[in-house]
Amino acid sequence: MKIYQHTVHYYETDKMGIVHHSNYVRWMEEARVDFLAQIGWDFAKLEENGVISPVVAVACEYKNSSRFAEVISIAVGIEECGGARLKIKYTMTNAQGVLICEARSKHCFMNTQGKLLRLKKDLPGFYQALQESQTKVL
């Protein structure tokens, strides 16, 4: 898997020149969208299959600050892929390899009517792609 790269924008920083903590969650989404595209299941394909994927939990541990114009590498890996839930781990580092943030998100999958989907049964191709990507965990 290719590691996602995010260049810190000026508007993402506060008066002290440090990235505001809320931006890390946005970066997680950017990296997750990129990850899904890399495994062949971008959001357009999921939506074409009538699938929505709400975030049900997010946790971040901020280790060091990041600043304007830094390039942050975000490694994404599947921590757990069950029948209806997916847990993703994110490791964010700067160009010097300093750990900036460790984070996790939990997702479920539903059809457009709000019915919970069982990935293995309802979307076997997607489930298989997620399983295969687990061998490439962070």
Image (cartoon, rainbow, N blue to C red):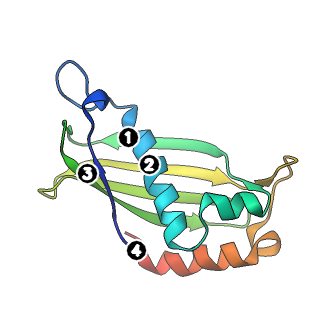
Mark 2 Cα shell of 10 Å, populated few (<14), some (14-19), many (≥20): many
Locate residue 47: give its quadrant.
bottom right
Closer to the N terminus: mark 3 or mark 1? 1
Q: Secondary structure at mark 3?
A: strand
On-image quarter of the C terminus: bottom left
Q: Secondary structure at mark 2?
A: helix
- What's the mark number on residue 1? 4
Per the model, the C-alpha gap separating discs 1 and 2 is 6 Å
Residue 2 percent across, percent down from the top left: 36, 71
Q: How many dots with numbers? A: 4
Tell me the residue at 19%/36% (across/down).
68
Closer to the N terminus: mark 4 or mark 2? 4
Tell me the residue at 25%/22% (across/down).
14
- What's the mark number on residue 28? 2
Tell me the residue at 52%/57% (across/down).
33
Name the residue beneath numbered marker 3: 72
Residue at the left extreme? Answer: 96
Type of residue at label 1?
Tyr
Q: Is residue 39 above or below residue 89?
A: below
Q: Secondary structure at mark 1?
A: helix
Per the model, the C-alpha gap separating discs 4 and 2 is 16 Å
Per the model, the C-alpha gap separating discs 3 and 1 is 10 Å
- What's the mark number on residue 52? none
Residue 125 percent across, percent down from the top left: 70, 78
Type of residue at label 4?
Met
- Pointers 1 and 2 in contact (CB under 8 A)? yes
Name the residue beneath numbered marker 1: 24
